[in-house]
Image (cartoon, grey):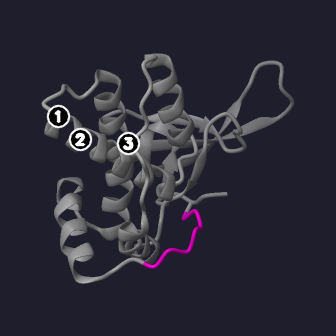
Amino acid sequence: MFKTGDLVLYGGTGVCRVTEITQRDLQGAEGNALYYILKPLYSNYIVSTPVDTEKVVIRPILTKTEAEQLIDRIPSFHPKPFYSRMIREVAEHYEAHFKTYCCADLMELSISLYAKKQESERQNRKFGLVDERYMKRTEELLFGELAAALGILKEEVPSYITARVGKKGGEPDGKCDS
């Protein structure tokens, strides 16, 4: 169970701070249920979710060391861009990677989308709307967690990554960081 003040990743919402743990009396249920009250770091609303929820992924965010190790591994990632003539297949492929909420999976997806975008630009082709939407969602979630873990602003994450990757090479370990 998380404590008040903890930073957690709450599904597609992203990084949230646990602001309160409260009991709620639910009609038809015996006793009171415990709920987390979460405040997303990058949005202006409140989320209330059962402590024992299994419907949405809720996990601790990466530590600073884990975030740095993930960034250091970037040169070892070699994901290939995904292509299909069917938009539904493209969306399903991206969604499968996105829904793990694993930072290593999100990093791979982000890198593959970036490669696809660069390839489209080289060929003077338009980058797909589905590709663009998932690139934005992936970066929002990934950069938000990295920013919180590293103690920097979300806007500073790309330059932090560039500076850090420029200093070191990555060591593949094949493990999922979260």
- Find numbered disc 1 in the image and state the secondary structure of the residue it sits on: loop
Q: Amino acid at mark 1?
A: Gln
Q: Is residue 105 left or right of residue 131?
A: right
Q: Which residue is mark 3?
A: 138
Are the residues flagged by discs 1 and 2 in contact, CB closer than 8 Å? yes
Q: Nearer the viewer, residue 50 or 24?
A: 50
Q: In the image, what residue occupies the spot 23% across and 41% down?
A: 119
Across and down, in percent, residue 76 comes to: 42, 69
Q: Nearer the viewer, residue 120 or 38?
A: 120
Instruction: Return the residue found at the far front.
Output: 123
Q: Quadrant of the C terminus?
A: bottom right
Are the residues flagged by discs 1 and 3 in contact, CB closer than 8 Å? no
Are the residues flagged by discs 3 and 2 in contact, CB closer than 8 Å? no
Q: Is residue 131 left or right of residue 85?
A: left
State the extent of the magenta-drawn residues as a range.
171-177
Q: Which residue is mark 2?
A: 119
Q: How much space separates mark 3 and mark 2, taking CA atoms?
A: 19 Å
Q: Quadrant of the N terminus?
A: bottom right
Residue 58 within the magenta-colored segment of the rendering: no
Q: Amino acid at mark 2?
A: Glu
Q: Point out which mark residue 71 bears.
A: none
Q: How much space separates mark 1 and mark 2, taking CA atoms?
A: 6 Å
The overriding secondary structure of the stretch rendered in magenta is loop
Q: Point out which mark residue 123 bears.
A: 1
Q: Is residue 164 left or right of residue 30?
A: left
- Is the residue marked by circle 2 packed among few (<14), some (14-19), or many (20+) residues within 10 Å? some
Q: Nearer the viewer, mark 1 or mark 3?
A: 1
N-terminal label among 3 and 2: 2
Residue 174 within the magenta-colored segment of the rendering: yes
Q: Amino acid at mark 3?
A: Thr
